[in-house]
Amino acid sequence: MTDRLATTLDVNGRSYSVTVEPRKSLADALREDCGLTGTHLGCEHGVCGACTVIVDGKPVRSCLMFAVQAEGLAVRTVEGLAEGDELHPLQRHFWEQHGLQCGFCTPGFLMLVAGAFEADPTIDDAAMMEVLSSNLCRCTGYQNIAKAVSLALKDMRAGR
Amino acid sequence: MHSIGRPLKRLEDRPLLTGAGRFAADIAFPGQVTMRVVRSPVAFGRLLAIDASAALACPGVLAVWTAADVADLPPIDFRMTKIDGLEPYRQPVLARDFVRYVGEPVAVVFAADPYAAEDAADLVFCEIDDLSPCLDPLAEPGEFAPGASTLRTEPAVLRKGYGDLDAAFAQAHAVVELAVSIGRHSGIPLETRGAVAILGDDDVLTLHGAAKVVHYNRDAIARMLGRDPAKLQLSECHVGGGFGIRGEIYPEDVLACAAALRLRRPVRWIEDRREHQIAANHSRDQSHRLRAAVDGRGFILGLDVCFFTDQGAYIRTHGATVSDLAAALLPGPYIVPAYRVEGHIRLTNKTPSGTYRAPGRYETTFARERLIDAIAHRLGLDPVAVRRVNLIPETAMPFDRGIDALGTHVVYDSGKYHDLLERALGHLGYPALKDEIAARRATGEAVGLGLAFFVEKSGLGPRDLARVSVAGDGAVRIVTGACSIGQGVETAMAQICAETLRVPIDRMTVVHGQTREIPIGFGAYASRVTVMTGSAVKLATEDLLGQASRIAGRLLQADPAVLAYRDGAFLHPDTGASVDLATIASQSAEGLTGEGLFETSHMNYPYGVHVAQVRIDRETCGVSVERYLVAYDIGRAINPMLVEGQIVGAAVQGIGGALLEEFVYDPDGQPLATSFADYLMPTSREAPPVDVLLREDAPSPLNPLGVKGAGEGGLTAVGAAIASAVDDALGRPGLVSRLPITPDFLHGALAAPAGR
């Protein structure tokens, strides 16, 4: 298990050359080898969704994918969501609607919604609310997350 | 411009939104060693031997420790509610002679990286002579250490009471009896625990990943290590949820510190999810038997209670806290002129317990409110009317309960209970809502309403210190002894400071959870931060402003008393000259720092009403919560948006405990809820719209802000309200006698003949 493989990860438009064991999860590689600790691990069972990242335009549980499987694919993490100081509409509305408390699940929710929107830009609010139920939050009771997502979707559809 | 009372955006959010948060698992040091815990695979047994030779032979493994290697470390002591007889039941940092629950640490492996450490830990072999586990807290107490001591598995029985119970029962119109139980659940923060210890060149050991009560923990860990507390510092990172369980001292924290000292390398331990489910504190799990003597109106003349708390395998840092709170606060909002309670603390071969948000109140509110419903049913009265008859009137405030909790005398400081009840009913349009529900039921739908009243407690002392300073550039720094568990401490403290200082909160930074920054701190638990630390911040800001006005008087050549203060600057009323705080700070040789110490010997008591509307699918026996109301009097809301966030989040957490969450064990004591696939928490699909009726009708007279705590009241009565609504939906009063109300339980209960 300890034979390491050299691979290249394309994350947030930047190329990372890493040498990892084949069994290393994408989440661990992002956090340890790329230094991108915004992707969090809440369960490593694929249930909580805190580790959600976008892989080739779709939301993916990075705890359930091996780093070596991501070679050649475009990975986006929460660190790549804002454009410089300009927050993504999701980030802005999460802030304004108090859609986070401890903030641990937040990157996963942001990437889940951003990824679901990228995968289907015509997705309506009801379908997005179904998508939201795939991640866990223990602080907010989801009410303000739902409000923030609904407002952000309006902006995202308008291309703001 | 006032700052208190405004729904300001949080100071803490930007890093959390951009992936720049620093949680315990994000802390890494060059040369660090990973610690991995080897845990008992069986519930109870004699630990005969541990063979670590295969693990030690693995590449990258530095050391493996067992109890023999840490024989110098004492068991973990009680932080709270120490009572006689508990000491022998404290948990050692590594199992000695016996293993007592699945998940108990028996050895630790130190290796170069997490994957290697986990591989090696799998190769540590424990030779254990299995014993028959005790899993039923209601069974006769057994032996704690068979053949080794005479200790029994009932470490203590708490007894409290007041009034003439015999007289109450002698004059009773009726006696109503009830037995109820609450399942085993816990806080389950999304971030697991973590401890990263590093020894600096200055011989100061720093533990990162600390939380909740860093000052107490520094002193307690230093005592265990035989180390000068000045040579140990605890540092809080971002914290991914607290809920009572996080931040207590656990074996892993002590082991990481000891290892950093001995191995002379940074030591990093990050818990995985399965470990968290079996190693971090469990909670709840009480069984209550209640007997009430009532008059013809349903007024409780006397209440006699016996309850059992399943404390798990050891008594951890909370000592008797949960049982103590349950015993003292069970009577809640009602007069109850005579009361007697006996609380049995029982040990079983399960993960040890501690507190979980609203400890002792979630359980007893369920028990008490079920009793009120039972009284109403027995006497043929309206359950809301029975509550009105029993509620403590406003004229009786402050109300001395004649009982102690957490070493403080229970005196309800303020409250308008009847008023809040009527406001909650009015808010819902209760009579019309009841008719609407009845009409739906008439068409065959299983829908129902349930209501529960509760009293919370908050603002536990004894004291808190805060320092506020202004720098030459006008930046404000607030140093506190509080901790942040995600609840918005920074924003709340900044708003309190800004109310007095009249400067925007975005010029403020708030320090918390850092023992090296401030000598006194009592941390974040018992809904105490806004009350205690907030009051200290207010005093510190006033102290700062007093100093600033004296300097301003000198600079403006005027009596400080005549200066006007506006938006961060002092103004001379005659000349119109002004000087702002930044200038004053830069003109002052010793800087500009105010200090505030707030002390109290009493808790305060917020209160509220929960109303649940549920629908039951008769086929699947699944319960859906259609809507939920929390009416809550907080005294004064510093930031209503954050308060509502606390309440809504807590309500949904409570719904988890009422309907979904339970640590289930098989007959051998193997835990069955060790992942999120088995321990079910609410997702957005299970979360109903939660309506919050936030009131400020009864400010606390016990602190200069008038505030009461916000952290727990959203959760306290959820089990009670939902149970009542399920009864109502099915037309079966008293059907729900336990939580969680799982489909399995409901199916069994519905299959049984009515009236049983």
Image: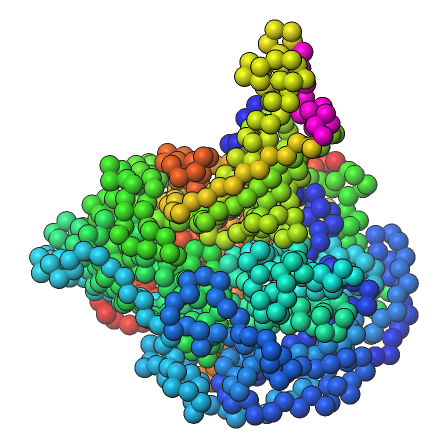
Q: Which residues are magenta?
A: B577-589
Q: Is residue B378 left or right of residue B6?
A: left
- Residue name at image x 61 percent, y 69 percent: B226
The quarter holding residue B24 reads bottom right
Q: Residue furthest left?
A: B171
Which residue occupies the foreground of this view, B203 or B333? B203
Would you place residue B356 above or below residue B255 in this image?
above
> Can you give x and y, in whole percent of width and height, for residue A30 in the image?
79, 61
Residue B504 seen from this side: yes
Q: Is residue B588 magenta?
A: yes
- Report the quarter where the N terminus of chain B lies: top right
- Residue name at image x 39 percent, y 83 percent: B151
> Can you give x and y, in whole percent of width and height, for residue B378 in the image?
17, 58
Would you place residue B326 above or below residue A84 in this image?
below
Residue B182 seen from this side: no
> Can you give x and y, in whole percent of width and height, for residue A28 in the image?
76, 65
Would you place residue B405 above or below residue B584 in this image?
below
Q: Is residue B8 left or right of residue A110?
A: left
- Residue name at image x 84 percent, y 56 percent: A11
> Can you give x and y, in whole percent of width and height, for residue B631 in the image?
39, 42
- Report the quarter where the C terminus of chain B lies: bottom left
